[in-house]
Image (cartoon, grey):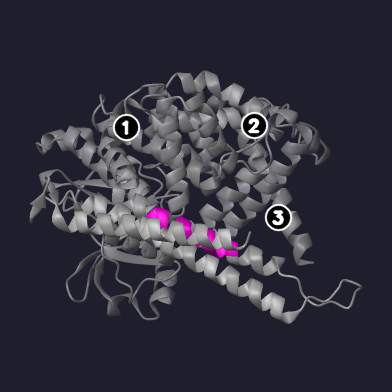
Amino acid sequence: MMEFLKAGKDLRRLNELSNILIKYGFGDLIRRMGLADSMERAGKLTRYQMSDDFLQLQPPERARRAMEEMGPPLIKPGQTLATRVDRSSPDWIAASGRLQDDVPTTPFEELRPQVERSLGQPLQSVFRSVDEKPLGTASMAQVHRAITVKGDRVVLKIRKPNIREKIEADLRLLKHVARLAETQSAELKRYSPFQIVREFERSLLRELDFSVECKNAERIAHNIVKFRFAKIPKIYWEWTCEDLNVQEFIDGIPARNVSEIDAAGLDRKLIAKRGAKVAWHMMLVDGFFHADPHPGNILVLPRNGIAILDFGMVGRLSNTRRDQLMKLVRHAVLGEIPAAVRILQQWANKPVNFEQLVSECEDFMQNYYGVPLDQLNIPQIIDQAADTLRVHDISLPPDIAMLSKTCVTLEGFGRLLYPEFDLMTEAQDLLKTWGKERYNPGNLVRKLGLRAFNYVDSFFDDTDTALPTETTHSVPVIDKQLVQLLARRQERLRYRQIQLMTAIGFLLASCLLMLLPEGPKLWGMHVVGIVFFLGSVGTINWLLLATWWGYRSTE
């Protein structure tokens, strides 16, 4: 019965959304998605005329109003248009920008019962005063200023009543529509709309839990503590829960208010560079980053500082993924196309034709051959790689797709403040540092040692599985003494291998010691390094001789 009721509600919601699209003149979109037949079978015709009230409105304004009526799952994608000042026309930017400001507000008296349930006590027991006029209104929450009984200035981020149920219903509907679009439109199927909706669902449901957002904020605050100019609001955990976020109030200028920033005498170029510096550090060093750095989530502070807000949407990049990304950039610079394609293969979720993919990558990779790191455009490289993979019906991994979206949003924020802003220029120092750290002698020695131990471990596993055992079949049983003899010889060989790898490690370390700037020198090299070098060479020669002698004795 509950499933039936859900289906009935979803069908009503589908009709409601179709009404909104038709109302604002987007009925043709239903046809292009391959949904017209299904809607007609459901009794919803798509041939209605747009109301005369909207004939004078331009498409951007009609789209904005339609998204606002549809609710959070449609408002969120629309908000990203406001940050693309370099790609979107001014009318679309203006319309989508109002999605961040003009979301309908909810009277505080309707929010009070929910807030008191979350606090577990009357509002006046915790807060001396609460400003009933919202400081900001978003698609899923509303923010109000308040003062605690101890006098701390805070903000209350309150989840709108019944918003979870509405979002879950819309997400169910979006999944149904995505499945339908895949079955009825070959053009849309190649973009995997159902998978996109699933990923959007996971992200949106995480945003609904404000306690997760607060944990994200504290983690990022810890990671960027060295940036004195960056501030993350303090969380008041004693009052924070799933539907209420109580955090420190930070008084600043919203980053999108360029005129106020200029009036305060602040340096917009420096602010943009600092924002990019923090963002690149989160992405490339920490691997845990704010994934929605649009101007509405950034405040400008005195002395050109910045405050970062709203950590509901975050991205994660593992060490392996960051390493792959850096390698892809390096291979693009050096023109090493097969090596770059091997990375794209690792990103793929199904087998691909290697030779064909190499051939298709040659054209766009040639555009970056010999280009300095500070002139590269990582979002563009990722986008072109995605286009190439899409030809093979392969989508980017979710974490790489999130990184690309974040870079696009960040670039829009920077150019809003400073039109000549170049995102990649701000990553130059980190890219160079990555190259130095990856290929410095100390790291090479450490990786060589790890490779040696991995080799030894794999050798143990292979020989253990290869040793014959007694069975009940007709295979002859091997004498136990012979097995013990083979095992002892194998152990001796393993021991010699470990000794040899250790000696090689000391040899590499001695080369570094000879370069020490202070201390006793001989022939321009440090004495300690020379001693270690000679000892390592002697040990290696002795081990090689012992190994040769052992091999000779078995002949």
Horizontal and vertical percent position of residue 315: 44, 51
Identify the image quadrant of the C terminus. bottom right
Bounds of the magenta span?
A: 446-459
Q: Are marks 1 and 3 in contact (CB under 8 Å)?
A: no
Q: Give the labeled residue for mark 1.
A: 424
Classify 423 as above or below 516.
above
Q: Residues within 10 Å of mark 1 (few under 14, many from 20)?
A: many
The residue under label 3 is 9
Residue type, numbered disc 3:
Lys
Name of the residue lying farthest toward the right: 474
**Which of disc 3 and disc 1 is earlier in sequence?**
3
Residue at the spot x=69%, y=67% of the render? 465
Residue tagged by mark 2?
354
Prevailing secondary structure of the magenta residues: helix
Viewer-side residue, 324 vs 477: 477
Instruction: Please tell me how crowded label 3 is: few (under 14), some (14-19), or many (20+) other residues with Cα within 10 Å.
Output: some
Three-letter residue code for mark 1: Met
The reply to whether callout 3 and callout 2 are in contact (CB within 8 Å) is no
At 20% from the left and 54% from the top, the residue drawn is 530
Q: Quadrant of residue 275?
A: top left
User: Does residue 43 appear left or right of residue 212 in this picture?
Assistant: right
What amino acid type should be assigned to the residue bearing mark 2?
Answer: Phe
